[in-house]
Amino acid sequence: KKNEERYDIDFNSLTDDEYNSDFYFIEFKRALSKSHATSPGPDNIHLRMLTHLTETSLHNILKLFNRIWKEKKFPSSWRRAVVIPILKPGKDAKNPNNYRPIALTSVLCKLLERMVNSRLVHVLEKKKWLSPFQSGFRFGRGTIDNILLLENSIREAFVSKKHLVSILFDMEKAYDKTWRYGILKDLYGIGFKGNLPIFIQNFLKTRSFRVRIGNTLSDVFYQEEGVPQGSVLSVILFIIKINEAIKQLPTGVSGSLFVDDLEIHCSGEDMGFVERKLQDAVNKISEWGKKNGFQISSQKTVAMHFCRRRGLHLDPKLLLHDCTIPIVRDAKHLGLIFDSKLTFKPHVNYLKRKCIQSLNIIKMLSGTSYGAETSALLKVYKALIRSKLDYGCVVYGSASKSVLKALDTVHHQGLRLSLGAFRTSPIQSIYVLCKEPSLELRRERLTLNTFFKIKSNSSHPMHYKVINPIYGSLFSLRLSFTPTFGFRVGGILRNLNINDFPILEKVDEFPPWKDIKLNFIDDFEHLPKSTTSTLVYRSIFYEHRHRFSNYEPVFTDGSKSEGHVGTAVAMGNTVVSERLHKFCSVFTSEIYGIYLALTKMDSFNKNFIVYTDSKSAIEALKKINTLSHPLALKCAEMHQYLTEKGLKIAFCWIPGHAGISGNEKADQASKTASLMLENFVPLGDAQQAVRILILKKWQSIWDEQQVNKLHEFHPSVGHAIISNLYRRQDVILTRLRIGHTRLTHKHLLCSEPSLMCSRCQSILSVKHILIECPNFNIFRLNRFGRNITIRDLLGENPHQNLFYFSKTLVLTNSFEHFFIITHFLKDHF
């Protein structure tokens, strides 16, 4: 390292690369909107101060940033940080190693870093320099990708009767020991020159910090190595440096990275072969780490031997720094506990314990007489418990039903506490009132969402494995083996009675330094459609066309009906229409119509105005960003291509069904479109289709509950009943709707026979007391009137006198029904 550092890296360049150009105000505004209101650095400038500045002041800050950028200078105060030590939970406060350092740096510096980071990441992704097996802090990627990759490999090894050994590496203080010169060397090797790498070079120089405890500051300490803590650029710079680690793996060994979490694995029928391959990989990674300043911990690095072959099989002996890597039976990898048989039982048990701890918070807030509102409690449940159950469920959901059943009790208890329902309440009723499906249905939905997300990205390492999974014949013969992710998805799709469909490929992002400017004409948007006559619209349109007579009009429209989605373009006397996949949304049909119109303009040398009656499509084109609809990005891309050819193109919203002939032509053509040239579904539409399909499946399950008391006045699962009652009244109403109260169903808890009405000799129920029992006819007539039904009393709008009915009963002197009345009141009032 020292020998290499003797040579300076020359980043000066005569070429004018676009990523070295001055920053634009659109980049500045985007970076400001993405910044978080964290604590200020040593200069005490808070982000809120910047967000309240005028436009002129923000432009002045941008000028300062561009001077720093062009003059290749870096303010020395931006290299200083204040470190706040935070004690790790459950650790000894006397040991300095048990504190997590939180570094506070300049907000202005982080704002400029964010703009530089955006350019740097774009170039790296464009050049495909980052390994596809690195999932850390990349758009559309996450920890689930790495977990799924490992689980898929283990399932394949199991069914093919192979051993699979995985090694989970732990790097000691990876961020603090990153080789700075090595980062600059890698940037030079990638081909970066000019302002961007010089800024990073200046950014990494002579970093210093002071530790603050209370109001006391320590002496100044200098950080010679490592990337700065608390900085925006630090993560991507670290990823650049560690990117080469995955390339050290020999043939036959696979691996994945999530920032510094490195996992490698190898499978084979012969354990000796697996051991040799992995030892070779460990040696190469260790050697690479020494050269690049990374220290791999031999104490925390562990290995796992996954095997379902019969008989005894020796574990491999692997060495790291002359120390044996321990073989463990279960280990946590990116938040998920893997066990050697891949039953996920240890993870489910751990998850259940964590969720039960969080349930105590809901218990404290969910008193039946004083608790928080049901809607607030459900939000707490979703944030603290359901989020834990969701994480990794697409992987651990492959466990057996008997293992997963342990989590159902947590789910049920959380929902029951939120509602205030009685303990014997039917779980299907609780699902419907909370508008929360079973965990099984939720896992199916999240699994399909993950599948389509992977399918939309052809560069994803799991892309072809989920589309064309292998070992299908073996899995069909060996039914005791859990199939891989791709086969599990196929089973879910078949269960939902749908065929797999193509997903629209992810579109490359625009360079952050490109300001996408489309021309919009707003002649109609100021007129409310509800109060404006069609004659007025047509009159304004004729005047508008007179002003823009040198522009050729192009009308687009999209439509969606049951089982049919179409789009059309009317250009002069030519009308072009196409049919789209039934899962496409009406927005997709509208925006695809605009894209189709732009593609037709390529063969003309004219100016055009694209007319659409979709305000949402116009708004999408006005606000192009990384999260935009892929077809909106394609429209912007096509628009840029056409304008570079010299065409002038504008977009204009017009009201639909206002008698404008071109719009009426396009509307009619879109409704009758029959030819499907492009068969695709955007990812957002696919996930919406999954939501609807899972909802239909849930509805079919609910429709089977004909004897369920709630089903009578709540037949739809997708419709939530909103209550504005106090907690006590809300709990009463919930229990009455479900039909399970302390009076009517306490016998289930005490193993006693059902209570009977002494006069009617029928089982005592909520419906019997409220509607049927003749003993209460007088009170019922006074409060509810004649011909009342249970739906009138407990439906979406409960009867206004419902809560006074029992209070009226208590005034009676009828000793015969004293037992029923007092217990009814005890349960509800």
Image (cartoon, helix red, strand yellow):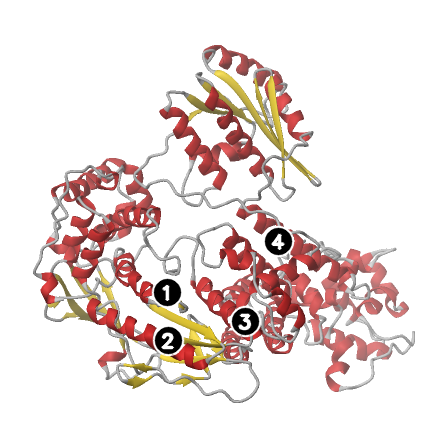
- Residue 778 horizontal side relative to residue 186, left or right: right
Question: Of the residues tagged 3 and 1, which is closer to the observer?
Answer: 3
Dots 2 and 1: beta carbons under 8 Å? Answer: no
Mark 1: amino acid = Leu
Q: For numbered disc 3, what is the local secondary structure?
A: helix
Q: For numbered disc 4, what is the local secondary structure?
A: helix
Q: For numbered disc 1, what is the local secondary structure?
A: strand
Q: Is residue 801 visible?
A: no
Give the number of the disc on residue 257: 1
- Residue 83 horizontal side relative to residue 474, left or right: left
Give the number of the disc on residue 401: none
Q: Distance between the residues labelled 3 and 1?
A: 20 Å
Give the number of the disc on residue 691: 4
| Residue that numbered label 3 is attached to | 155
Which class describes the residues within 10 Å of circle 4: few (<14), some (14-19), or many (20+)? some
Residue 685, placed above or below residue 615: below
Among the two numbered marks 2 and 1 on one chain, the one whose residue lies closer to the N terminus: 1
Which class describes the residues within 10 Å of circle 1: few (<14), some (14-19), or many (20+)? many
Residue 751, quarter of the rendered image: bottom right
Q: How far apart are marks 4 and 2 (CA)?
A: 43 Å
Mark 3: amino acid = Arg
Q: Distance between the residues labelled 2 and 1?
A: 17 Å
Dots 3 and 2: beta carbons under 8 Å? Answer: no
